[in-house]
Image (spheres, rainbow, N blue to C red):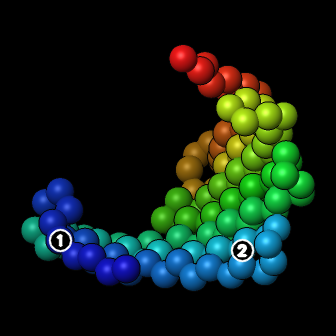
Amino acid sequence: MAEAGQFFDGTKFTLQLMPGWNVSSSLDINPSYRLDYVNFAKRDKSFTNHIFGIRALAMLSTKLSLLNYIQYNTAVNLWLVNVRFRYNPREGNDFYIVYNEGVNTYLNREFPPLSRSNNRTILLKYTYTFGF
């Protein structure tokens, strides 16, 4: 995918690649890469950002799945990690355990130095579909 256009008071060009690999009937791996070039001509400023990611979905059984997504963003020197475990006891019911974390890689870019963990959450979610 490629796109170009206005971005606030400047311009932005984006190129994104998202190939997919179906390793087996129970495993999908999807790497991704995104390049953003942003230029603010009136301010004589520009920056380039690279975002690398990989998504892996493992179907452990017909009722269990594990989804992992890891991303690195060069603009903010940050790793993002998302792990989602899904249990589907029957159609219309799902139980999720989700773990998210942001990890700073350049701690001294601010004063006082940043902490290693940007944020961390653990979520438990249960969904139930009502039938009418």
**x then y, percent, for residue 102:** 67, 49
Kindly identify the residue that appears in the image at 71 percent across and 44 percent down. Answer: 100
Q: Residues within 10 Å of mark 1 (few under 14, many from 20)?
A: few
**x then y, percent, for residue 107:** 67, 55
Classify mark 1: helix, strand or loop.
strand
Relative to 66, say whether 13 is above or below: below
Q: Is residue 81 left or right of residue 131?
A: right
Task: Calculate the distance from the C-alpha at mark 2 to the C-alpha at mark 1.
Answer: 31 Å
For the question of whether residue 97 can be seen, the reply is no
- Of residue 81 and residue 104, the one placed in the foreground of this image is 81
Kindly identify the residue that appears in the image at 75 percent across and 58 percent down. Answer: 68
- Tag shown at residue 5: 1
Looking at the rendered structure, the kind of residue marked 1 is: Gly
Tell me which label, 2 or 1, sits earlier in the chain.
Answer: 1
Relative to 118, say whether 76 is above or below: below
Residue at the left extreme, as displayed: 42
Q: Is residue 96 left or right of residue 71?
A: right
Callout 2 touching callout 1 (CB < 8 Å): no
Q: Identify the image quadrant of the C terminus.
A: top right
Kindly identify the residue that appears in the image at 85 percent across and 46 percent down. Answer: 63
Looking at the rendered structure, the kind of residue marked 2 is: Ile
**x then y, percent, for residue 121:** 72, 34
Q: Residues within 10 Å of mark 2 (few under 14, many from 20)?
A: some
Classify mark 2: helix, strand or loop.
strand
Relative to 119, say whether 57 is above or below: below
Question: In the figure, residue 59 lies in which quadrant?
Answer: bottom right
Q: Identify the image quadrant of the N terminus.
A: bottom left
Mark 2, residue position? 29
Q: Number of marks in the image?
A: 2
Kindly identify the residue that appears in the image at 13 percent across and 60 percent down. Answer: 9
- Of residue 22 and residue 14, the one placed in the foreground of this image is 22
Question: In the figure, residue 6 lies in which quadrant?
Answer: bottom left
